[in-house]
């Protein structure tokens, strides 16, 4: 059961801390950071993302996921992009990322173009954050203001990625805790989970749900079994949203209400628990979901950014300068 704070003193101090934190972060990240130093940066990123998503709709989901997996591990610092070195094992080989995290080549292409326009100015972390926003927009979803001015980390941690990134096998209580550890409340967790209204998952990830869980709509279960046998076919893909997978909308939540969540963690959001009412609300109102998702994404983009003299602006997103 989620802890409910008692008394006005706790609530007021929590609100005060949140406002103070937001003020500090907003003073460090600004939407017009590159207005004079690299005025074409945002248009370069947007154009590259639109082209990448037009070639493959799934890339929109992949770029969004890349941002999420970056920010949840030591903050939005592009650490997820770093290759292994002799001094650290990076995040790409963590269980949540290996053989599934995608979009690196799109980020590389954007970085090359931005470096040509203004060398050493725009960080890889900012490129990942903006590309995530532009991907959602390209898929018909909401937009939001992306604060800019992040700098890139000089190290990465496989162990931190293994520990911090929520698993698709988690129950509701574990999901709530994983997001709370990063400062998100339960409503924000449900909103961010709505990112699964696009993208695909491997058979290996949802096989257990298909063959062992009863709260899966029968026709969908039969269809999934044909694509995901009880053994073998680990890399076979199925859409996270079985109805409108190439669009960013609220169909994900409608699916959950009808027991059509692909992942165990998805269906946990509508399984007789505390988040059922939030899922129902989003299933009934696309605009409410869009607004809450955009707000939560702003908050996620503000997770522990490196600013000022911290970190660096990498010339190559895969390695430190």
Image (cartoon, grey):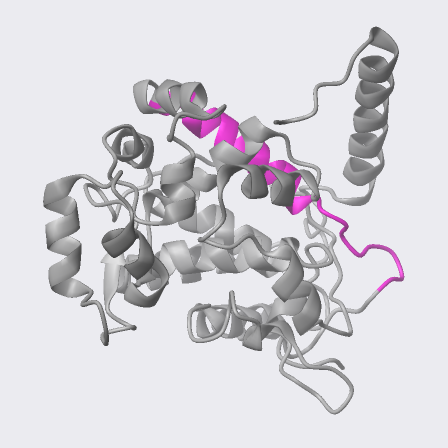
The verdict on residue 199 being magenta is no
The extreme top residue here reads: 8
The residue at 58%/29% (across/down) is 186
Q: Can the viewer see residue 124 in this picture?
A: no
The verdict on residue 309 being magenta is yes
Q: Nearer the viewer, residue 69 or 263?
A: 263
Looking at the picture, does residue 211 appear above or below residue 29? Answer: below
The residue at 29%/73% (across/down) is 235
Picture coordinates of residue 76, whole percent (x, y): 68, 55
Q: Nearer the viewer, residue 4 or 244?
A: 4
Q: What is the count of numbered marks? A: 0
Q: Nearer the viewer, residue 91 or 220?
A: 220
The residue at 55%/56% (across/down) is 67
Image quarter in which the C terminus is found:
bottom right
Q: Magenta residues, as a range?
A: 286-310
Picture coordinates of residue 266, whole percent (x, y): 39, 42
Picture coordinates of residue 289, whole percent (x, y): 42, 26
Magenta region, mostly helix, strand or loop? helix
Quarter of the rendering containing residue 122: bottom right
Picture coordinates of residue 71, whole percent (x, y): 64, 54
The residue at 43%/20% (across/down) is 288
Quarter of the rendering containing residue 283: top left
244 horizontally vs 319: left or right:
left
The extreme bottom residue here reads: 86
Image quarter in which the N terminus is found:
top right
Q: Can the viewer see residue 59 in this picture?
A: yes
Looking at the picture, does residue 136 appear above or below residue 234? Answer: above
């Amino acid at each position: 059961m989620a802890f409910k704070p008692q008394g006005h003193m706790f609530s007021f101090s929590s609100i005060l801390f949140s406002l103070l934190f937001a003020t500090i972060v907003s003073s460090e990240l600004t939407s017009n950071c590159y207005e004079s130093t690299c005025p074409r940066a945002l248009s370069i990123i947007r154009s590259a993302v639109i082209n990448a998503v037009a070639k493959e709709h799934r890339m929109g989901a992949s770029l969004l996921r890349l941002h999420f997996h970056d920010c949840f591990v030591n903050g939005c610092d592009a650490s997820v992009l770093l290759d292994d070195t002799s001094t650290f094992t990076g995040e790409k080989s963590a269980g949540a990322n290996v053989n599934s995290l995608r979009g690196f080549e799109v980020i590389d292409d954007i970085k090359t173009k931005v470096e040509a326009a203004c060398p050493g100015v725009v960080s890889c972390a900012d490129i990942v954050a903006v590309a995530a926003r532009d991907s959602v927009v390209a898929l018909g979803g909401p937009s939001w203001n992306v604060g800019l001015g992040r700098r890139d980390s000089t190290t990465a941690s496989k162990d931190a990625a293994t520990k911090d990134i929520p698993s698709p096998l988690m129950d509701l209580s574990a999901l709530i805790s994983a997001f709370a550890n990063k400062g998100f409340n339960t409503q924000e967790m449900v909103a961010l989970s709505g990112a699964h209204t696009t993208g695909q998952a491997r058979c290996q990830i949802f096989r257990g749900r298909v063959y062992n869980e009863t709260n899966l709509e029968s026709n969908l279960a039969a269809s999934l079994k044909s694509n995901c046998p009880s053994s073998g076919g680990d890399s076979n893909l199925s859409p996270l949203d079985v109805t409108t997978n190439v669009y960013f909308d609220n169909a994900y939540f409608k699916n959950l209400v009808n027991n059509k969540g692909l992942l165990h963690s998805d269906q946990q959001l509508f399984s007789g628990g505390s988040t059922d009412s939030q899922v129902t609300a989003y299933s009934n109102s696309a605009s409410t979901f869009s607004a809450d998702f955009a707000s939560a994404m702003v908050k996620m983009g503000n997770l522990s950014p490196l600013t000022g003299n911290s970190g660096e602006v990498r010339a190559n997103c895969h390695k430190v300068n």
